[in-house]
Image (spheres, rainbow, N blue to C red):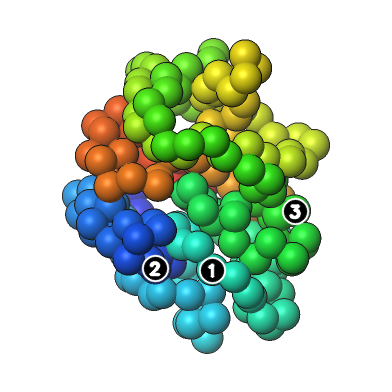
Amino acid sequence: MISEMRKIILITDGIFHPPLFGRLRLHEMFSQMDGFSFSRISSLEKLPADLTSFSAFVLHFHHKTISSSALERLDTFVKNGGGILAIHAATASFKQTMPYFKILGGRFIGHGKVERFKVEKLESEMFDGIGSFEVRDELYIHELEPGIEVHFTAKHEDKDVPVVWTYRYGNGKICYAVPGHNTGTMYNETYQQVLRRGLEWVCA
């Protein structure tokens, strides 16, 4: 149980990818969480000057470039104990900026068509009480950093690929979740539980 107010920055952007109404549903869902306070910006380039009062960032965007100063601020924030909940195309952003993927724990390398797939829950104390679920979305494939802990998987070409993972970077915590291409995904109640639990963990 979180006893103090956690200040979170939602860094979200997009009309089609990620979809606007899916992002709005995400904002609505997070606003219902007790013990959290949210502010929203559209880019890592627009981070507040003072980040010391913030517990975590939520990354839900698809951007092509990041400045060295914004990357350095992100890196410092996480190394110093800040959390990140990253969703869908966060790992497909800034493709030429390899240090960014060291922070998130994985780098997007491809996906198949939009289709329905089952997200299978593994043994996971962190997500205790949350079961497997289905979504119609893009299943991202990643190059992964050593040290990630996988909590949910899905089948791709008869292989289990990570769908939700956690990761530690410096003193900070990362939780990444693949689904988020379609608006309907953000209305999936089980997936909402996953995202809320992930945000709670990166702030703990």
Q: What is the secondary structure assignment of the residue under circle 1?
A: loop
Circles 3 and 1: CB distance less than 8 Å?
Answer: no
Labels 2 and 1: the sequence-earlier one: 2
Residue that appears at 55% across and 19% down: 155
Does the rendering let one see residue 168? no
Does the rendering let one see residue 96? yes
Q: Which residue is mark 1?
A: 63
Label 1: how many Cα within 10 Å (few below 14, some 14–19, many 20+): some
- The quarter of the rendered structure image containing the N terminus is top left
Residue 13, disc: 2
Q: What is the secondary structure assignment of the residue under circle 3?
A: helix
Q: CA distance from mark 2 to mark 1?
A: 9 Å
- Where's residue 40, x and y in %? 34, 71
Viewer-proximal residue among 46 and 179: 179
Q: Which residue is mark 3?
A: 102
Residue that appears at 60% across and 52% down: 91
Q: What is the secondary structure assignment of the residue under circle 2?
A: loop
Tag 3: residue type? Answer: Lys
Rendered view: 42 above or below 162: below
Q: CA distance from mark 3 to mark 1?
A: 17 Å
Circles 2 and 1: CB distance less than 8 Å?
Answer: yes
Q: Quadrant of residue 166?
A: top right
- Where's residue 174, x and y in %? 59, 47
Tag 2: residue type? Answer: Asp
Label 2: how many Cα within 10 Å (few below 14, some 14–19, many 20+): many
Closest to the camera, between mark 3 and mark 2, is 2
Residue 82, disc: none
